[in-house]
Image (tube, rainbow, N blue to C red):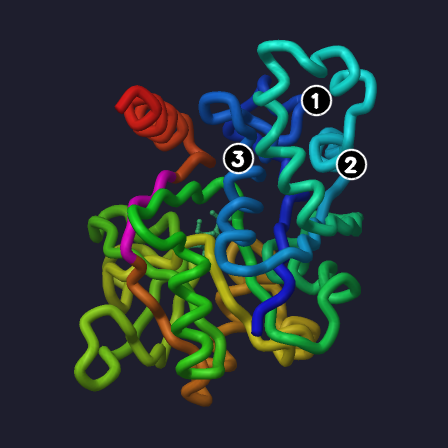
């Protein structure tokens, strides 16, 4: 059973300056919902109700979003706009949210390690909120929980990307598990390789289920690409022992960490809302 979901949310969001100067990038809205709310909804759909959020300076808006605003609720109670708060209110009622701060930005691996205090010794999910996913039947995390239940090891979401785009991602090496078209046993991983060094065009997307031994591995992981402690390098250690599955999820993913991806997501969800 996966009960907790970790959201690394301490990054500066420099690609969205000046919008992210005083507003966390996780709070940028696609239509009327902030990115991180989509991630929390995806976790809830996967049966997860404990949200662990790694924040940093200037991220208070995230905590306020997942809290009750009595003044606002009082103001709109009984009026035509009351329903606009029902979704977020439902999440607040069903989930617990806990927070810890990442004091220094030392990379995604370091952010995950910072969350250890909120997760403890159990397998957990990770959502990078700027990878916004939309699936027809079952959300990405829910699909991944089923894969985890079958293989009982770390699971990472992957997607084919054009070869000239691999430098933006962690890229995996591996073989399809017997009889499967979407499930790989991962043997290697490289963080943001040059296209000629990439082992494949299968890129890691910001959804992971990790076994808790990852924390000790991260503690021993030296800074890698960009001088940062890379989660990819830590998961590689599990992969070398055959303990990582790559799962090509069914659905669409938008890179909302880039302006292009953000606009594409906005158009996609807008068109969907009109259907
Ligand atoms: C992170 C990971 C990378 C992964 C990506 C997915 O990179 O380090 O392996 O492919 O998320 O979005 P970032 O986008 O934070 O630079």
The mark nearer the N terminus, 3 or 2, is 3
Q: Quadrant of residue 269?
A: top left
Q: Confirm if mark 3 falls within 8 A of ligand 1.
A: no
Queried whether the magenta region covers residue 217, the answer comes back as: no
Residue 103 location (% of width, % of height): 79, 48
Residue 217 seen: no
Residue pictured at 44% horizontal, 60% vertical: 142
| Closer to the camera in the image, 93 or 143 | 93
Q: How far, Cα to Cα, is label 1 from label 2?
A: 10 Å
Main secondary structure found in the magenta portion: strand
Quarter of the rendering occupied by the N terminus: bottom right
Residue pictured at 67% horizontal, 53% vertical: 51
Q: How far, Cα to Cα, is label 3 from label 2?
A: 18 Å
Span of residues in magenta = 250-254
The mark nearer the N terminus, 1 or 2, is 1
**Residue 69 vs residue 141: left or right?**
right
Residue pictured at 67% horizontal, 73% vertical: 215
Q: Residues within 10 Å of mark 2 (few under 14, many from 20)?
A: few
């Amino acid at each position: 059973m996966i009960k907790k979901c970790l959201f690394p949310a301490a990054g500066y969001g420099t690609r969205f300056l000046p919008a992210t100067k005083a507003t966390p990038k996780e709070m940028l809205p696609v239509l009327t919902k902030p990115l991180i709310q989509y991630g929390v909804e995806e976790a809830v759909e996967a049966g997860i109700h404990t949200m662990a959020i790694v924040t940093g300076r200037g991220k208070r808006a995230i905590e306020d979003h997942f809290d009750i605003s009595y003044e606002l609720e009082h103001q709109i109670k009984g009026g035509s706009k009351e329903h606009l708060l029902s979704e977020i209110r439902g999440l607040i009622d069903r989930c617990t949210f806990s927070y810890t701060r990442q004091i220094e930005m030392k990379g995604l691996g370091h952010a995950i390690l910072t969350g250890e205090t909120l997760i403890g010794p159990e397998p957990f999910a990770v959502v990078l909120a700027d990878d916004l996913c939309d699936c027809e039947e079952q959300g990405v995390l829910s699909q991944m929980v089923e894969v985890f239940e079958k293989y009982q090891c770390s699971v990472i979401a992957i997607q084919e990307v054009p070869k000239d785009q691999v430098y933006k991602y962690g890229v995996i090496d591996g073989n399809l598990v017997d009889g499967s078209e979407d499930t790989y046993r991962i043997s290697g991983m490289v963080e943001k390789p040059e296209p000629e060094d990439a082992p494949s065009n299968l890129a890691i997307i910001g959804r992971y289920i990790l076994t808790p031994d990852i924390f000790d591995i991260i503690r021993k992981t030296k800074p890698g690409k960009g001088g940062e402690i890379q989660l990819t390098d830590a998961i590689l250690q599990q992969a070398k022992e055959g303990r990582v599955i790559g799962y090509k999820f069914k659905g669409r993913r938008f890179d909302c960490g880039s302006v292009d991806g953000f606009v594409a997501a906005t158009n996609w969800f807008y068109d969907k809302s009109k259907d």
